[in-house]
Image (tube, rainbow, N blue to C red):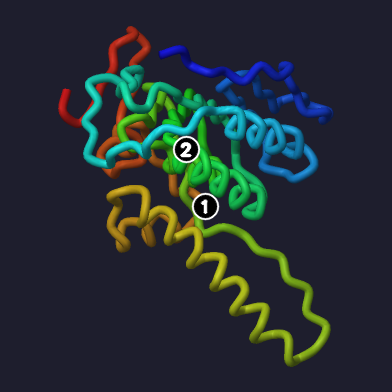
Amino acid sequence: MAIQKFNGPYIMNRSDELNFASSDYKIFIMDKFKQEKCAELIANLYSMIDSATAHPMLDTHYQTKSPYELPKNNPIALDVYLNSGGGDFDVLSQLSSLFGLAKSKGIIIRTYVPAYAGSCASMLAIQGTPGYRIMGENAQHLVHYGRTVNEVNLETEVDKAYQDMKNHANATQKLYLQYTTISEPKLKELRSDEYGYLSATKCLKFGFCDWILQNNGYLKSKIK
């Protein structure tokens, strides 16, 4: 079966850093999650997903011997390379929705963290398809409480601003508890300050990734 590929141009976002790019079934996120910087990336990702032929959704019990092995019923993988400190939660929400759209069409989301995934980048990386989430040997995730900015002009708005901050914290916590195996007490411990760093080994232990790509080229997993 021939794999249909996105034949659009190689698009790089028009930002000062030019750190966001996408082409075929690969996207690279190497800077902050900001709407202006990520606009073309998000639009191009829509095009990639729309151009793909739909296949059955991947069986959640499918066991991979390698993150580069694709099941016959799901021959398309979207490779997402992340090396970012995070950014705005609304951008993460858009990318999360697109991940869901891709999965609904049977596309496998294969995430790579070569060095660092912080905050929103961490929350996106863990949403890769189970069995297809890869980290570099010396890579790290940063898990923290998150930040919100609220301007209050009236006394009646104080409680609403507080609830907004709580809602944000609960939403980020829900993602970690849904897509990893970390316990709630351990997650709260990591989020208690701004130093919630997890090594690749710890990420493998807590289900943030499925494979560690070692510098010698060998892959390490929980079962290997």
Q: Which residue is pictured at 60% across the width and 39% down the height?
A: 85
What is the quadrant of residue 153 in the picture?
Answer: bottom right
What is the quadrant of the C terminus in the image?
top left
- Amino acid type assigned to the residue bearing label 1 in the image: Glu
- Amino acid type assigned to the residue bearing label 2 in the image: Lys
Given the current orientation, which residue lies at the most extreme bottom position?
A: 156
Q: Viewed as shown, does residue 192 lie left or right of 32?
A: left
> Which residue is tagged 1?
194
Residue 46 location, x and y as percent? 65, 37
Q: Residues within 10 Å of mark 1 (few under 14, many from 20)?
A: few
Circle 2: element type: loop
Q: Which residue is pictured at 44% across the width and 43% down the height?
A: 127
What is the quadrant of the N terminus in the image?
top left
Given the current orientation, which residue lies at the most extreme front position?
A: 1
Residue 9 location, x and y as percent? 74, 17
Residue 207 location, x and y as percent? 30, 42
Circle 1: element type: loop
What is the C-alpha distance between the residues marked 2 and 1?
37 Å
> Which residue is tagged 2?
105
Q: Nearer the viewer, residue 75 or 115?
A: 75
Q: Which residue is pictured at 62% across the width and 79% down the height?
A: 162
Q: Viewed as shown, does residue 125 lie left or right of 35?
A: left
Q: Residues within 10 Å of mark 2 (few under 14, many from 20)?
A: some
Q: Nearer the viewer, residue 17 or 60?
A: 60
Residue 183 location, x and y as percent? 28, 57
